[in-house]
Amino acid sequence: MAKKPETVFKEKVASFLKTLPNCFYEKVQQVAIVGSLDFTIVVSGIPILMELKKSSKDKLSAIQQHKAEKWQRCGALVIEACPENWDRVRTLLEEISRQKFKPWSVVCLK
């Protein structure tokens, strides 16, 4: 059985993120929590949330838009990626990954 185009695109994005320097990501697969974006990513210290769409015509749902705005207010970059804009998104992520950053230390507050 052939994979859906959205699945193929998600696998392409995940494969790229695996190779990106200074990057950690998780695919978000929350069936019970509505509105979560597809990927939570940190590249060179910058928090990024990414929602994948099968086409540039598709938009965030109202709850996704609400959550995206909350993330943005806290300083995260929110990206809507689709096959049509993937080359630009990939280039942006590569540019961010080349930036110098100082990792945080693990802090335990008691």
Image (cartoon, rainbow, N blue to C red):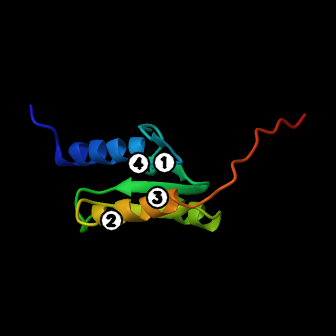
* Residue 9 at x, y percent in the picture: 25, 49
| SS at mark 1 in the image | loop
User: Circle 1 sits on which residue?
Assistant: 21
| SS at mark 3 in the image | helix
User: Circle 3 sits on which residue?
Assistant: 63
Residue type at the position of mark 2 = Lys
Residue type at the position of mark 4 = Asp
Residue type at the position of mark 1 = Pro
Say which label, 4 or 2, has the lower sequence index.
Answer: 4
Q: CA distance from mark 1 to mark 3?
A: 31 Å
Q: Is residue 83 left or right of residue 66?
A: left
Say which label, 4 or 1, has the lower sequence index.
Answer: 1
User: Circle 4 sits on which residue?
Assistant: 38
* Residue 104 at x, y percent in the picture: 73, 47
Look at discs 4 and 3 and give the one toward the viewer: 4
Q: Are marks 2 and 1 in contact (CB under 8 Å)?
A: no
Relative to 99, say whether 11 is above or below. above
Residue at 37 percent of width and 64 percent of height: 91
* Residue 99 at x, y percent in the picture: 56, 61
| SS at mark 4 in the image | loop
Residue 103 appears in view: yes
Say which label, 2 or 1, has the lower sequence index.
Answer: 1
User: Circle 2 sits on which residue?
Assistant: 59
Q: CA distance from mark 2 to mark 3?
A: 11 Å
Say which label, 1 or 3, has the lower sequence index.
Answer: 1
